């Protein structure tokens, strides 16, 4: 395992702090968690991770954490849990094996060593990835690809069942929530006015007040105003179509209508 | 003519990676001093003359372009299947059941405005068409379904669409407490209106 | 080997024009029926081997790239690549080498919790994707790398990752938890359930 190359790269990295030495200038900010601290300490032993002394490492970590705690009271729980675990590991390693369940001290130490090797391997791999051939940096793609012009024909997927379901859903939904329907009764639609005007126009050949075409049964003022507006719109539409003539003798005077003789 | 093949490689890479055509001066500036840029370009032009890609001069600058006789390869026809949005599906259903129907009527039935894209999708699918104009103020365009619609949905006639009661019988309609909402639902009243509209629709105005 | 030079020209034009690597099937679909696409690609690869531009295989697809030895002169054309943080880079390596891998397994390998932003950066870059769910209690999502990752790092296949075979042989790519950091990462208990999770991963659950 090439620990050297990573070491070098690591130091170049701006967010890596100086390695803690015996002088112990410690700053936790630069570490990526307790495993990272262990890895840095292990590298300080300057041996292959396979031959590392986990016991030494545990002691170094514990004194490291102690040192940090002297300087700052706050230390992330992660680091303290690791310290506790390492203290436990140390005791398992030093005391004679007892007849209880659970892994032995050696087994635990092996696991930790394995974890460290694994992290080390991933670090080295990430460095190698970056130092390899990176497209866009070491090898460039065509700067001005003409591309493929795609002529797209869309085909939509929809079954009759989908269609019916959509209609049914919509009907159902609407059926349940449409309180505004009550208002609609009061509105006299332009269509209705047009219908009425068309039917009645022939019966009254002379100039007649437009308002006489309003439906008789309207009582409330809102409906009446609505009918007046709609009837006026209807008359304008019919005048445009050449079916009738409109006149008004003065401002605000009654509007009169007459069927056009040459109208259809 | 002796051209340093390394210079040719360099120019080739530069022209390939450049995001725009390069003129000889720019190339010369990037190549080692003393490179004979004209000879380099001439060599490259010759090398690529019969390839699928040619070194082409555009407005005095150089760039690689697909050989003109192969340009057709860069056009791809693609058919994509897409699902209709719920809005499009409902709109289509309303048009099918109520045609001819205006945009405003669709909006009223759905109780929500119709975004432009919704109708576009249905036109794109070839399922709806303008049918004519309603003889009401503003003369709004009415819409109906097309022959393709009938073919796609396997219908012989638009009247083959199941009616409201059949939908209910088929379990497609949630038969919620029907009595309570009957007055509110307004189906009766509104359908009446639309039926009138249908009658007034002037077939002569259809733009087939 | 006799290859129709017209087919070579066509493949050349397509590969030059494409804005991303193309696989053999895509090329074959665009070439005339019966074109020997493997032979065509082999011919092209050979023709361009010593040029300023090479035909390269990335993620199982083919693309033209500038020759690696000319990188120094293409300074200006180079994309400015975002620098990844050490955490992001390590996470990316762990995902690449161990995929499919869960968040908890990444955290265990690094011995530290993963901040939310770390994965976001990798997703943003388009280098990782969710792959499916581990069939263990909690059904955690697993992550893997994308084709873009392979393309960006100049790899044809995941097995081309540096040192992949050695690491695998050394057992360093096992995701079996050591149990040490159960308490550290705060995933207590859950890790236990994930033991031999890799074996239990159900490929059917992968969302391709």
Image: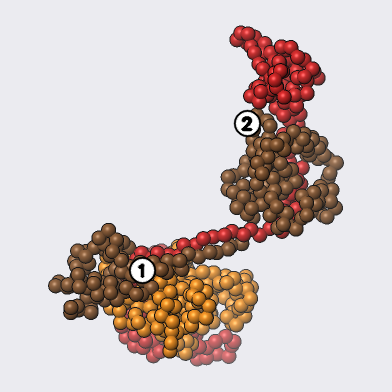
Chain colours: A red, B brown, C orange
**Looking at the image, residue B21 lies above or below residue C24:** above
The quarter of the picture where the N terminus of chain A appears is: bottom left
Residue B168, image x and y in percent?
A: 83, 50
Which chain is disc 1 placed on? A
Residue located at (79% from left, 35% from top): B192
- Asked whether C198 or C58 is in front, the reply is C58
The count of marks equals 2
Residue located at (81% from left, 47% from top): B164
Residue A66, image x and y in percent?
A: 38, 72
Q: Residues within 10 Å of mark 2 (few under 14, many from 20)?
A: few
Q: Distance between the residues labelled 1 and 2?
A: 55 Å
- Asked whether A114 or A26 is in front, the reply is A114
Residue located at (48% from left, 70% from top): C128
Instruction: Identify residue for label 1.
Output: A142
| Residue A214, quarter of the rendered image | top right
The quarter of the picture where the C terminus of chain A appears is: top right
Residue B138's label in the rendered image is 2
């Amino acid at each position: 395992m090439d620990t050297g190359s990573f070491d070098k790269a690591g130091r170049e990295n701006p967010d890596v702090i100086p390695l803690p030495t015996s002088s112990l200038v410690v700053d936790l900010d630069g570490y990526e968690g307790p495993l990272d601290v262990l890895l840095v300490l292990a590298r300080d032993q300057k041996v292959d991770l396979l031959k590392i002394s986990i016991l030494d490492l545990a002691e170094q970590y514990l004194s490291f954490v102690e040192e940090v705690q002297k300087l700052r009271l706050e230390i992330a729980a992660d680091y303290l849990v690791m310290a506790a675990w390492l203290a436990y590991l140390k005791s398992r390693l030093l005391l004679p094996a007892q007849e209880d369940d659970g892994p032995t001290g050696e087994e635990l130490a092996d696991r930790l060593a394995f974890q460290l090797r694994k992290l080390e391997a991933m670090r080295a791999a990430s460095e190698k990835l970056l130092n390899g051939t990176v497209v866009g940096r070491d090898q460039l793609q065509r700067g001005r690809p003409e591309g493929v012009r795609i002529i797209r024909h869309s085909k939509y997927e929809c079954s009759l069942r989908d269609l019916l379901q959509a209609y049914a859903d919509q009907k159902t939904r609407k059926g349940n929530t449409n309180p505004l329907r009550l208002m609609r009764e009061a509105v006299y639609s332009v269509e209705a006015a047009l219908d009425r005007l068309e039917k009645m126009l022939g019966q009254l050949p002379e100039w007649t007040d437009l308002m006489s075409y309003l439906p008789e049964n309207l009582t409330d003022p809102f409906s009446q105003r609505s009918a007046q507006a709609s009837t006026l719109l209807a008359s304008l539409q019919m005048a445009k179509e050449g079916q009738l003539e409109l006149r008004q003798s003065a401002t605000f005077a009654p509007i009169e209508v007459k069927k056009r003789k040459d109208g259809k | 003519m002796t051209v340093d093949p390394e210079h040719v490689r360099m120019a080739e890479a530069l022209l390939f990676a450049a995001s725009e055509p390069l003129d000889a001066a720019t190339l010369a500036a990037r190549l080692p001093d003393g490179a004979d840029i004209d000879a380099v370009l001439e060599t490259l032009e010759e090398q690529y003359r019969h390839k699928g890609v040619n070194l082409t001069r555009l407005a005095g600058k150089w760039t690689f372009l697909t050989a003109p006789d192969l340009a057709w390869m860069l056009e791809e026809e693609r058919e994509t299947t897409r699902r209709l949005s719920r809005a499009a599906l409902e709109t289509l259903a309303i048009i099918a059941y109520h045609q001819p129907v205006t945009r405003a009527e669709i909006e009223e039935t759905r109780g929500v405005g119709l975004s432009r894209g919704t109708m576009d999708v249905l036109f794109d699918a070839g399922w709806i068409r303008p049918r004519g104009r309603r003889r009401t103020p503003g003369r709004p365009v009415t819409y109906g379904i097309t022959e393709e619609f009938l073919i796609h949905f396997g219908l012989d006639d638009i009247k083959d669409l199941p009616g409201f009661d059949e939908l209910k019988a088929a379990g497609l309609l949630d038969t919620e407490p029907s009595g309570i909402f009957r007055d509110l639902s307004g189906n009766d009243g509104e359908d009446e209106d639309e039926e009138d509209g249908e009658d007034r629709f002037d077939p002569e105005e259809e733009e087939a």
